[in-house]
Image (spheres, grey):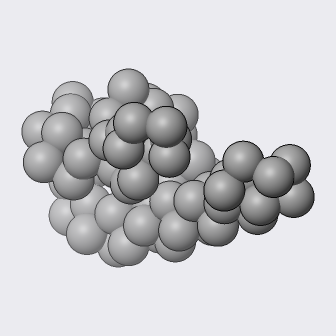
Amino acid sequence: MPALELWCAVQTQWRHGGFAGPTGLDYAGVRSSPAFRALGARRERIFADLCVMEFAALAAWADRRSRSGHA
């Protein structure tokens, strides 16, 4: 649950590559967010979970683009 809460809190931290859409999270922005700093000693483990979620989201969006012909 903490990773999902962090995920929701940092949705403004996506980097965008123009027409390609999001290219990944801005890790400096994530790490400086109050939500990340509030995690205390668990923050690195939860950050790793966040990175897994980021990878899955990017893969899903890429799949959606390829299926719609907007690669």
Q: Residue at x 53, y 68 (%)?
A: 55
Position of the C terminus by quadrant: bottom right
Task: Classify residue 6 by image quadrant.
Answer: top left
Task: Classify residue 48 by image quadrant.
Answer: bottom left
Task: Classify residue 14 by image quadrant.
Answer: top left
Q: Position of residue 68 (x, y in %)?
A: 86, 49
56 or 34, nearer to the observer: 56
Left or right placement of residue 51 versus residue 66 in this view: left
68 or 5, nearer to the observer: 68
Q: Is residue 19 above or below residue 25?
A: above
Q: Residue at x 42, y 67 (%)?
A: 51
Q: Position of residue 56 (x, y in %)?
A: 63, 66
Q: Is residue 61 visible?
A: yes
52 or 21, nearer to the observer: 21
Q: Position of residue 11 (x, y in %)?
A: 45, 32
- Name the residue furthest right: 67
Q: Residue at x 72, y 48 (%)?
A: 70
Q: Residue at x 20, y 64 (%)?
A: 41
Q: Position of residue 53 (x, y in %)?
A: 56, 62
Q: Is residue 46 visible?
A: no
35 or 16, nearer to the observer: 16
Q: Looking at the image, how many numbered discs can be counted on the residues?
A: 0
